[in-house]
Image (cartoon, rainbow, N blue to C red):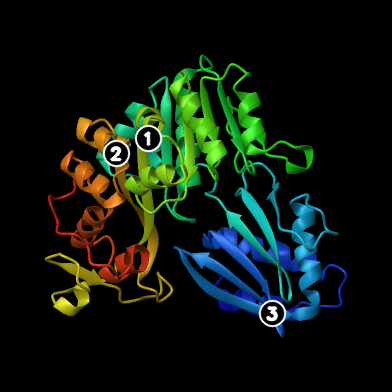
Amino acid sequence: MPAVALRDVLGKLEATDPRYATEVVERVLAEAQATGASDVHFQPGADALELRWRLDGVLHPIALLPTKVAPNIVARLKVLAELLTYRTDVPQEGRIRGVPGEVEMRLSTFPTLFGEKAVVRMFAGPGRFLRLDDLGLPAGVRDELSHVLNETSGAIVLSGPAGSGKTTTIYACLRELAARSRGERSLATLEDPIEAVVPGVAQAQVNLAAGLTLESGLKSLLRQDPEVIAIGEIRDKATAEIALQAALTGHLILTTFHAGSACEVIGRFLDMGIEPYVVRSGLRAVVAQRLVRRLCDCAQPSSRSEDFLGLPVCRAKVPRGCESCRGTGYLGRTVLAEMLLPESDELARAVLARSDVRTLERIAVGAGMIPRWERACAAVEDGLTSPAEVRRILGVTKPPPRIHAAEK
């Protein structure tokens, strides 16, 4: 159902009906799932409750609902996620539990000037992105990541900004490990919150009310005879230290971390006060990823230099827009990924010397790492995405000179 049609359907519902909030939530979430939206925003304002959803990484307005219904709609979402409906003054997070086979959903609420804002994150549908081969990673990154999953110790860090697919990748890694081990390895997670069920993995969720934090939970989990531990996200120095120490003592650690590039992960760990020797010895691999919109088949080739937007490319396509892509010029997304294997002696010395991120990246590229800008330029020349989309995702800074062509 197009957004216009959904807006018309919602507009015909009677706000005084006792089931109004239930109907709105059911219809919006069902249509978001059918459309392939990744997030649904319920944002209260002075005059209306604004509904928007994110398609291929871009927010689109859906409808405006009466302000007076906003508390009831958010309360209905909180009931589905088993959150406290009477607490409207603190942020809350929870998982919306659907029937088996439906899309996994996570709810986050946050108090704002005009009431609680709610955002529903919708994960990939059943049967999608289950294993490494399903993720669309560059062949070299996929093969190297698959190889390091066979290691028995070390930390594998998946980095990128919010919405870059880190969670999808870490769950694919867990399913890969569960399938390979056939029950012969002890796999455990500590998440905040649990976002998908993975058979064969002992999954636990942070519970602040009960005193189960990432730090305390990880300490206890290490006494559960785990061989592989997945940590939902490293957010502070204490968790980072425990995770990297566990990586040094015979555990394979999988975790996510907010950083703009693979080398920025190392830089941020050092800035947090983690000892350089722990970072050097504990890190097994870092994968930094971004999602860019994929051009629709209606895209047109361009030879105008102004369309290249300063990217060092020799050819490009630009979006046009058609009925299939809803006039956006894009349909679906593809992943740009760089993988750092901190194995070289020069890189190890640079880490121990607390070198800056730019120096670390120069050394890593010299050792064979294909950086994000190289991946992006190759995707543009292959007609997968546009220069404008690369700029939207990677920013307007001047890209470095291209060193070598990225492999397909």
**Residue 89, image quadrant:** bottom right
Q: Residue drawn 73% across and 42% down?
A: 208
Q: Residue at x 45, y 29 (%)?
A: 176
* In this view, the mark in front (3 or 2): 2
The residue that disc 1 covers is 276
Near-viewer residue (406 or 285): 285
Query: Reading the chain from its start, which is encountered first: label 3 or label 1?
Result: 3
Q: Residue type at mark 2: give it.
A: Ala
Q: In the displayed image of the protein, which residue is found farthest to the bottom? A: 47
Q: Give the CA separation, mark 3 to mark 1.
A: 47 Å
Decide which of tag 3 and tag 2 comes sooner along the chain. 3
| Residue 34 placement (x, y as % from top left) | 56, 60
Q: Residue 201 appears in which quarter of the rendering?
A: top right
Local secondary structure at mark 3: loop
Asked if one can make out residue 296 in the rendered structure from this viewpoint, the answer is: no
User: x, y (%) of residue 62?
Assistant: 59, 75
Outermost residue, front side: 353
Image-quadrant location for residue 153: top left
Q: Amino acid at mark 3?
A: Gly
Q: Is residue 383 visible?
A: yes
Judged from the image, the secondary structure of the residue bearing numbered disc 1 is helix
Asked if residue 170 lies left or right of residue 7, the reply is: left
Q: Are marks 3 and 1 in contact (CB under 8 Å)?
A: no
The type of residue carrying mark 1 is Pro
The percent position of residue 134, horizontal first and vertical second, equals 39, 41
In the rendered image, the quadrant that contains the N terminus is bottom right
Write down the residue under mark 2: 353
Q: For mark 3, what is the residue?
A: 45
In the rendered picture of this protein, how many numbered marks are placed on residues?
3
Label 2 or label 1, whichever comes before in sequence order: 1
> Relative to 16, is 123 above or below?
above
